[in-house]
Each structure stands twice: as C-alpha cells, then as structure tokens.
Amino acid sequence: MTKKRKHQEDFQKVKLKVGKKKPRLENATDTTFKTKAIQIPEQLKEDGVLPTQNRKLNIKDLLSQMHHYSPGVKHNALLGLKDLLSQYPFVIDAHLSNIVSEVAAVFTDKDSGVRGAAVHLLQFLASKIRAEQIAPFFPLVSAHLSSAMTHISEGIQEDSLKVLDILLEAYPALLTDRSSILLKNFVELISHQQLSKRLKSREKLSWMLSVNPNRRVTSQQWRLNVLIRLKKFLQAVVDGSSEREDEGLQEQKDSPRSVRSPVCVSWKVHANNQQCIQLFENGGLRPKINSSFRLRSLTGVMDSAEKGLSSAENLKGFIEIIIPLLIECWIEASPAQSAPILGNLLESDSQQLMQQVLSIIHLLWKLTKRHDETYKMDLWLRMNYLVDFKHHFMRHFPYSLQETAKHKKKDLCKGNKYCMTSSNSVDHLLLNLTLCDIMVSLASTSTLQMDSGWLDLIRKFVTDTLQDGSKLNSKQVNRLLGVTWRLMQIQQNKVATEPLIKAVYTLYQQRNLLFPVRTLLLKFFSRVYQKEDLRTQRIRSSFAGWKCQVQDNSVNDVDYFSFLFSTLIGFSREELTSLQGIRGKPHISQSQLSPVRLYLTDLDQFLHHWAVTEVTPILPSWQGFSTLICLSANRFHQCSLNFSMICHSLSTIPSQSQCFDILQTGICKYLVGLVVIPDSTAGSVLCAINKLLDQACILSETLHKFLASCCYSLLYFLLTLDKEDAEHLQKRDMLWGSCISALALLPRLLRLMLQSLQVSRICREELPVVAQLLRLLMQHGQLRSHMITNEFLVQQIIKDIMTLKSGEVQEQWLTDLHYCFNIYLASHPQGPGPVNTVY
C-alpha cells in the first residue's frame, strides 16, 4: 500500500471541472504580439493615378511600347508620348532619363515612320529640356547619333542628318565636345577608304568620294546635304571656342590692355605676400577660361582624341582628309565639267555646293589661327594646298550665277534650257568673297612677287565690287572689307592701297545704305587711322600726297557725324566695354568725389587721338577723311592745318547747332553711365564741346553732370601726377586747357563740379588735392568771375575741410587755401568778409 500511494503522487492527474478555464502551464511560450499600421500614400498609389493621354496610357505604358516588335505600335507610342508631354510637361523632369534613352534608341529603327516620329518628338523635347538637364545623358544620345550616321541603311543615314540639325541648334556646345568622332562620321558619309597603290602596306589609307545609286537623291545632292551640316558643325566649333576669331574687321585688339602676357608665379614669393596676382578676365557675366597660367597641364588629363580640333595634330589630320575630298566635290561642280562653253557661269546647284566647300575651308582656316604656332601652320597650309587652290579655285574666277529661263508664252529664250547671260543678282558674290578670303590668307608680303598674278585678279574684283553700285548686305560687306584690309597689309604702297580706299568710300557714298553696312564702313575708316602698327609702317605713304582744301563748309551728310563721333571717342564700343573691368594703378586714376574713373592711355595713342580731335570737326567731306588719314600718318605737328585755321573754319559752319545736337545725343547714349573712360576720350569730348558750343545750343542736365565729372576726374589726375612720370606729364597742358575752357564757357558746369566736392565722403589724403584745386580755380583769370558767383559754395567747402581738420595742427596747404580765399573772393565788395570771420 505504501509503494502504490507514492507512485500515484508522482503522476497525479489533475481533474478539470466543467466551466473552469484550463490553468496555464509553467513552461508555456507567450505567443501574443502587437501591431501598428504604417501608411505610405505615395507608394500605395496605383498606376492609374499617373497622367494619361487620350488613349488612357501613362508614361510607363508608352515607354514600354517602345520595345514592341510592331512598327505601328512604336509609332503610336511616340505620338502618344508627344501628346502626353505636351499636356503634362512636368512628366519630362520625372522621367527624363527613360525618355531620352528610349527616344535615342529608335534613331536606328528600320521603319522610316518610326524614325520620323522620333525626329518630331526630339524637336519637341529640345525646346523643353535645357542643356544642363540633358548633359548627363548626352553621351548616350551622341552614341546613338553616331550609330545612325554610320549605319548601312541609306534611309537611316538621311534621317540622322535631321537629328543632327536639331542637336546643333539646341545643344551646340554638348555636340562639339565629341567632334573627334562626329567629324569622322561626316567623312564616311560621302567617301570610303581605299588602299593607296603607292603603299604596299595599310599604314596609310586614302579617301575617295563614294557613289551610291540606291539613294533617293543624286550623289551631288547628298554631298551637298552632308557638307551643309559639316559647315554648321564647324561653325559651332568656332563659335564655342574660348578664343574667338572675329569675322572680317573685328580682329583682336593689340592695345596694352588687351594683350595677355604670361604670368610668372614664384610660389615662395607669393606665399610670403611679396607677389600679387590679379585676374580680371573671369569677372564678367560669362567667364572665359583664358588664363595665362594653369594649375596643372591639361595634356595629362585628356588624350589627343578627346581634344578634337583644339589639338593642332588632330586639326592637321582632319584637314589632310577633308581638303582632297572637298577639291573633288569642287571639280564635279565646276563649270568646266558641266559645260565648257559657259566659262565661269554656274548653275544654282553647283553654286550651292561650291559655296559649302569654300565655307568649310574658310572655317578650317579660322581654326588654324587659334594655335600658338600660327606662322608654322600658315606655312604648312601654303605649302600643301596653294598649288591646288590656284589650279582649281582660281581657274574660272570670278564666278557668276547662271539664270534658268522661265517658260512663258512669249519667251525669247524658248527652246533653250538656259539663257546664256549672267544674273544681275548678287547671290554669287559671297562665293567669290569667300574664295578671296581663303586665298589672301595664304599670301604675305614676302611672297608678293610669286603671288602677284592671282592677287591682281582679287584686287580688281574687290575694287569693281565696291564701285559697281550693287546693294550689299552686311555679311557681304563684312567679308569684302576683310579682304580689302588683308590686301592693304600684303602690299603696303600708295599704288595698291589708294584705289582700295577710294573704292570703299565710293560704297560709303551710296544712298539708303543699311545701318549695319554703314556701321561696318565707319569702323573700317576708323581702323585705317587708329591702327597703331599701320601708322608706323609704309602704308602711310599712300595718303602722303593727298591735299585738303575745304571748299564747302556746310554739312550735308548726317552720317558723317557718326564718323565724327567715333573719331572723337577714339575707342570702339567693345573696347570701352572691356575697360570697365580694369581697376587700380597704374592704368586707372580714381577719385572718391567723381563717378568717372580715367583709363590712362599711352602717350603715342593720346597724342594721335588729340591731334585727330582737333582737326575733325571742320572736315565734313571726303577731303576731311583724307586729312584724317594724312594726320594719322604724319602726326599732328606735321599736318598743314593749324589751330587758328580750325577756329576760323568752325565759325563759318552754318549747321553748328545740328552738329552739337548730334554730338550731345551720342555722348548721352554711349558714354554717360560708363565707369571707366580713357583720358584722351574725356579730354576730346571737352575739346569738342568748347569748339561746337554757341548761343543756340542747349545742354541737357545729363550732359552737364557728365562733363562736370569728367572735368574733376581730369583735374584730379593732373594734380596727382608724379614729377617723374614724364610720359603723362606731356598730357598736362592739353587736358588742363580743355578743362579750364569748358568751365569758363559753361558756368553751370563749374557750379555742378563745386557741388560735387562733398569732402565729408573722401579720405584725408585727398583733402590737399581739393584745396589745391580750389586755389588754382580762384587764381585763374578766366574763372574768377564765376568763382565769385559761387563764393558761397567755395566757402562751404572750406568750412567742411576745417571741420574735418579741427583739433589738428593747421598744415601749410590749408593756410594757403585761406589766403587765396581772402585775397580773391572774400575781399570782393559783395562778399561776406574774410574767411577767418566765418569760423
């Protein structure tokens, strides 16, 4: 009994009662848990919430259909994309990567309809996407474009040119960054490689024009289409370069302010604050990477292939490939190939192809000027291509455009396809001028004897074009004047240059010239006598024999005043704009009391400008222009006109008030508001005001304030000159005389200048200069009556100076100022008494 009871105690069964909960086991696992909901509304949105187009397809649906095998589905998807993005432009930014990649992928689609829809969509996207937005994806776009240009299908190649047009117009800088690849694609579009017979190995392959009879257009028309795009591409390369080669007359300035000399940096000296480096070129609205030194050489970062045409080696290589192909295109389109009896008459299609050939060569020539070894590049071009150019290009020069007769009921040329007469239009002129520009760039003074034959042809053509009375546009005139200037540089003697100058003036005398044309002509005239290096060369001899006799003093051509104004200013608008960024000595004279800072010109430029200013206002005719040129060449002290004759002639000009009104308008429009003005310009303006002002002339308040600022800036510059500065000391008499004459002639001018002398705004170092200026003005006999009239202003200025110097030892300059005031102003009967009684 005892063992049985113990066994039951170890395994005792627990009896559960009905209605009672089963007790929890001691080793039971707790499986309870708590949850909280996390709501993400944007992620839970369904695709139906995205914007859809009229077929209820959103952006994801349309992009997915771009991979469909059916051309119709892809075509509809492209049309749907354009419809959707037109209605919801914000979708472009959200899906830009996918849109660009999918659209670029169909550049090489086999179906022409799909490619056409892709081109239209790309045109739409280009107007919506900025360059900085598409820049990360542009390598992919460029790769698809290159694939389309080199595709085996002729249709894909033709459509690739349409894509190229869109990208060149919208993103030229991004496209030209990949010039090394795209230029080769251009070559392959019109030619193919072949092994040269002279070479046994494939170390060098030559290129020859290809003919594809499967194209929808003729081979000549296809080449024209390709060359048009190549010309646009090269133009974008030229325009996008940081070192721009200006067209025609707009050449690089050779004045001291525009020449960038190399900056030699010694880092040890610079670290010790013993060397100061100033950089001004990147301070504008559009910074240019054109510094004289680099932190590291860029040659180690990019190879020659990535440099494109910026590398002289790559440029030479491309020229060696493309020039022979262009010459072949020229030969096919030349008059000798089409109809020998036509001579130099061209058909319209041939003229277009030849124009593109010359334009491409002209752009390549401009790119060669960008490299450091320009002289070596010119010699290389002359040695390799001058013979071919003379043989092919100059063979039928000059070229004329042949007219196609329109068939009418009464047509004298009925039955003849062409009328054998030259066209009266000037469409062919740009072709001839481009050819002239290319050829004269290969000539120089040293090769004048060898090139005299074809140079005489060009010189005769230029002279005849200037004198035949044709209405020319600004582009033609710009190119024409550029060739004229180059001819004057090559042959610098009177026999060659005088007919060219007279021919340009003949064009200038035409009635109803366009404003851009007249502006170019005036710039050419200014350049003839302002060019410093030409004044020191033999070109001056072409004007040495010209004489000036003023027979008619009346001004009968308003445009001459434009020439007069540009002569008085002495600087172009571009030059004045470039001066605004210059700060500090030794080039700038600055006072805290005047908003006008003076740019200090070199002595030769100043003397020439001043001499031309003195003689200009009395010569409103061709004789006046010739005298300007004579004056430029022989300097002002060698000119036959003297100052007394100038004053006498000025007094006899009946239209003096009109001349002054035009001058006043020009000053207010182009000079007022500038911060930096050359000292010669400020002095010349004051000199011209003194000569042209009479009782009938009324000065505006704006001009009064500007002239007052110029006067004080000039006087401050003269009073702060160092005695050892021999160059600028020679300007003193001329500038001082113009300022005093203007202040004596215009009492209002003197009052405004005195009112601007608010000495409380200046530093202590400028106070002695103001005091010296007041002393000199009071002592001057011509200004004494005006100073007495403004006695209260002078007294107030002296009082302000005394306030600033109160509590300090009175210096000698202040004592001298008190003395002059008491002698010249306070002793006047109407005055308030000595200055000492005021304080």
Image (spheres, helix red, strand yellow):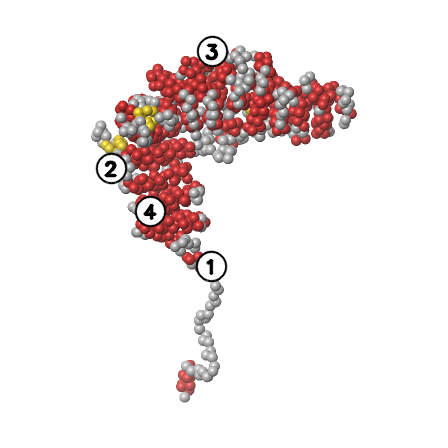
| Residue 40 disc label | 1
Q: Earlier in the sequence, mark 1 or mark 3?
A: 1
Q: Residue furthest bottom?
A: 1
Packing grade of label 4 (10 A; few <14, some 14-19, many >=20) is: many
Q: CA distance from mark 3 to mark 2?
A: 65 Å
SS under mark 3: loop
Residue at label 4?
A: 114
Amino acid type at image mark 4: Val
Tell me how far mark 3 sits from mark 4, CA to CA.
72 Å
Task: Give the Cα separation between the discs numbered 4 and 1.
Answer: 40 Å
- Kindly state the secondary structure of the residue where label 1 is placed: loop
Q: CA distance from mark 1 to mark 2?
A: 63 Å
How many neighbours does mark 1 have within 10 angstroms: few (below 14), some (14-19), or many (20 or more)?
Answer: few
Amino acid, disc 3: Gly
Q: Quadrant of the C terminus?
A: top right
**Which is more N-terminal, label 4 or label 3?**
4
Which of marks 2 and 3 precedes in the sequence?
A: 2
Give the SS element for disc 4. helix
Q: Quadrant of the N terminus?
A: bottom left
Residue type at mark 2: give it.
Pro
Relative to 188, 762 lies left or right: right
Of badges 1 and 2, nearer the viewer stands 2
Position of residue 101 measured from the top left corner of the image (x, y, whole percent): 37, 47
